[in-house]
Amino acid sequence: MSLTKIPFLVSTALSTHVAWTPPNPPPSQNERLKNITLSEALFVKTVRKGPYMTKIMIWIVCLCEAAVIYIRRNPSSDLAKRLLQLLVPGASTLSSRHHAIGQIRLSRIFLASWLLTSLGGLVRLECYRLLGRLFTYELTIRPNHELVTTGLYSIVRHPSYTGAMLEGVGVALYLMSPGSWVQECGIWKTNVGKCLILGWISNVGYTLVNMTLRTKKEDVFLKEEFGEAWEAWARRVRYRLIPGIY
């Protein structure tokens, strides 16, 4: 097992942190769209609070995996033995714990997950830059609001959601990848691990499904606000999330 994986783990956590950190504070009540549906209100509350869980969980998982990689390289200290007992709950003996962490490695699935999370984080960061003060989680019209149609918005109409989906799929792949701390050290076998990971999967699944549905609402909202400018943009940029598919 190589220390080479540690930078990949840190960048995975950083990409996820960037992707789920709103660049602006919530808009004022005067700027928010009025008469929103109950499902929209629930979705906004979820995406405001849910990402905290995602960021905390991914930092914990990545740092724990980095810790056991380091312990494997320096196994003899009393601190290392105590940490192994804590971080490898799926093994009951010292030798079985060392065997478990010896399975942690850079797998092809992990590298694919890293590419997805990195790309997702970069896409979200670029959307933050392009929209600037206009990027909000709530449906909002701000003073001097403009229709942004350049950069990533000239490829698909809702690229920030595309980035979030890449990020969500990437993290899920990482958690399931052979050679990961979650898979090799018995985290799935603990009640706490099951609750945290299944809770995260449920939250992200709900968020990504609602993001897909929300693209239609946003298109209606923007069409009403910008009229012919939006229609011209929609003719040029036909797809909402995935070029050539959707």
Image (cartoon, grey):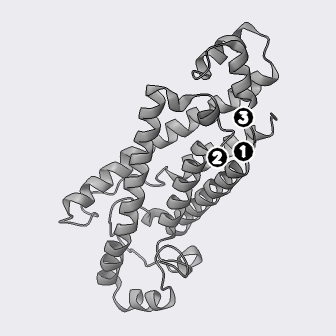
The numbered mark, 2 or 3, whose residue comes first in the sequence reads 2
The numbered mark, 3 or 1, whose residue comes first in the sequence reads 1
In the displayed structure, would residue 178 be above or below residue 150?
above
Name the residue type under label 3: Ile
* Residue that badge 1 annotates: 8
Residue at the (78%, 16%) spot, across then down: 75
Q: The N terminus is located in which quarter?
A: top right
- Viewer-side label of 3, 1: 3
Where's residue 114, x and y in %?
67, 51
* Residue that badge 3 annotates: 104
Where's residue 19, x and y in %?
53, 53
| Rendered image: mark on residue 12 | 2
Evaluate whether residue 110 shows in this view.
yes
Secondary structure type for disc 2: helix
Residue at the (44%, 55%) spot, across then down: 24
Nearest the viewer among 16 and 170 is 170
Q: Residue furthest top?
A: 78
Whole-number angstrom distance, CA of label 3 to CA of label 1: 13 Å
- Viewer-side label of 2, 3: 3
